[in-house]
Amino acid sequence: MYRINLLVLALLIIFTSCNTEQKKPDNDKKPAATDKKIFKYNQGSGIYSLDPAFAKDQASSWATNQLYNGLLQLDDDLNVKKCIAKNFEVNEESTVYTFYLRTDVYFHDHPQFKDGKGRRVVAQDFVYSFNRLLDPKLASPGLWIFNGKVDMEEGPFLALDDSTFQLVLSKPFRPILSLLTMQYCSVVPKEVAEHYGKDFRKNPIGTGPFKLKFLKENERMFLVKNENYWEKGLPKIDQVNVSFVDNKGSEFLMFEKGEIDFISGLDATYINDLLSKKGELKEERKSVMYMQKAPFLNTEYLGILMDLSGSNDKTSALAEKNVRKAINIGFDRERMMKTLRNNVGKPATSGFIPYGLPAFKETNKIKYNPDEARKLLIEAGFTESNKPKVTLLTNTSYKDFGVYIINQLKEIGFEAEMEITPSGVLRERMANGSANFFRGSWIADYPDAENYMTLFYGKNPSPPNYTRFKNAEYDRLYEQCLVTIDDVELGKLYQQMNDILIEEAPVIPLFYDEKTVFVNNRVKGMSNNAMNLLILKNVELN
């Protein structure tokens, strides 16, 4: 009997062990059905890093914005709002910014903290985070945030006490508050960042509304609600699931099947399935989705090299101002947008500053006028038998725009052609000054027109001054805008600079982009801002 009982006991142990083994979670299988409110999206480009110091692209910015906070944040109207800083002061010289921190903000739980519980954020954490950003050993692409704006020998980042952080600029820089809203400026804990070193990129610990639960790079990522989040009542969902399918067609099918909750941007794969020729969501689609359309701070443009010292063609026809001006008015932007973009985006007829920024002013100073363009070419000394020659460099993604513009330029008297160049090679040629005529785009790093005007400041290298434009009056106005506080006066300065760019034409604006997002009807509270920043803490699911 004793032996039989032992045998039965042994069999029970084996049976139980087998069942336990079968119930182990399999990270390679889809998560089981759940009552949790889970928001799902796809990031086709993948995410290189979850370290905010490397949030250099949209993919990383979208993810890190869920995991971290900074001193300040943006609302949907691009106004700078308080975040971890509950208040701040600026001295009379606009060089010392003193931030008073909230005392109820905690990092996510982690074994590096006492008892594994997230500790409170203090001013020294910002000192560490900003110094880390500037550390050449880290090689953060966000180094430019403070580079040239602070004097490292003077100790520009100070913790006056646990709740008081001070930032000292070497000279006034009015847009600094906008820069501080960027993901680069998020606060990170020293003990965790240094514990992981380079692997902090996949072991993020911040203060944000969500925290990392699972990451399998290039496959999927799960973020879960931060139950200790300091903004009361947020987030409103339990989890964010991110897939990494690098195919627009597949992504669209996932959206149609309800496997993801939104898709962002326009692609030839689905544009005509969703939009009418007027750029509106087709009626038959409205039962399952809605469209958000808003300004997107991105100006698409053609750049013209003004300093030909590094060019292979030092006798370029583009050296003549009238030739550049002829290009600016020699193609029909409205027809271009209707034909190639289903009217998503606005023709850039008012200069380089995009609509969506407070400094934008609709002037329509760049008007399609092919007859005037032909006259400008004649005034520049060109004839039917001596046409100006131009070669537009672009990449495959913008081939259709290149074909359109080249054909239009031929109609007004140019001998024009296009050269398709890989994106990386094109950027390199733009940077080293060997691209005379190129297609480019500028997406705002922060919501201030200064971020656009800096592309043409004569003292700036390339990048960002890819055109090598130098103009003494422009430079004077730019330097003045950095210290001007009055919004009305600032707007006038920006328009004066904009007018100089239209007159000298180192840049040919093509269109001001618009953000187009298609969202499942079950999603409410989806953010809609011109920075195209993904904000999920306010999202609700039906």
Image (tube, rainbow, N blue to C red):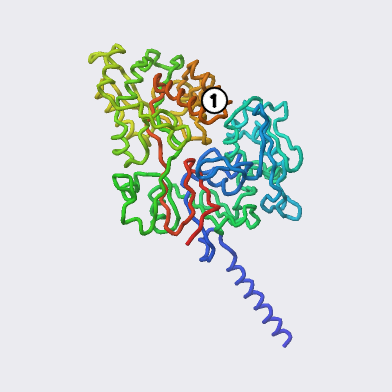
Numbered disc 1: secondary structure: helix
Q: Does residue 435 appear in the picture of this structure?
A: no
* Quarter of image, res 377: top left
Of the 4 image quadrants, the one containing the N terminus is: bottom right
Residue 482 locus on image (x, y percent): 57, 26
Identify which amino acid the numbered label 1 is placed on.
Answer: Cys
Seen from the viewer's position, the closer of residues 429 and 105 is 105
Residue ranking furthest to the bottom = 1
Q: Where does residue 8 sit, x and y in percent of width and height? A: 67, 82
Determine whether 534 is above or below 388 in the image.
below
Q: Is residue 507 at all visible to an observer of this figure?
A: yes
Indicate whether 500 appears above or below 451. Answer: above
Residue 109 location (% of width, % of height): 68, 54
Q: Residue at x 64, y 25 (%)?
A: 171
Residue drawn at point x = 62 percent, y = 39 percent: 185
Specify few, some or many for label 1: CA neighbours under 10 Å numbering under 14, 14-19, or 20 or more: many
Q: Quadrant of residue 480?
A: top right
Q: Is residue 79 above or below residue 483?
A: below
Q: Nearer the viewer, residue 150 or 224?
A: 150
Q: Residue 483's quadrant in the figure?
A: top right
Nearer to me, 413 or 31: 413
Judging by the rendered image, the residue that carries numbered circle 1 is 481
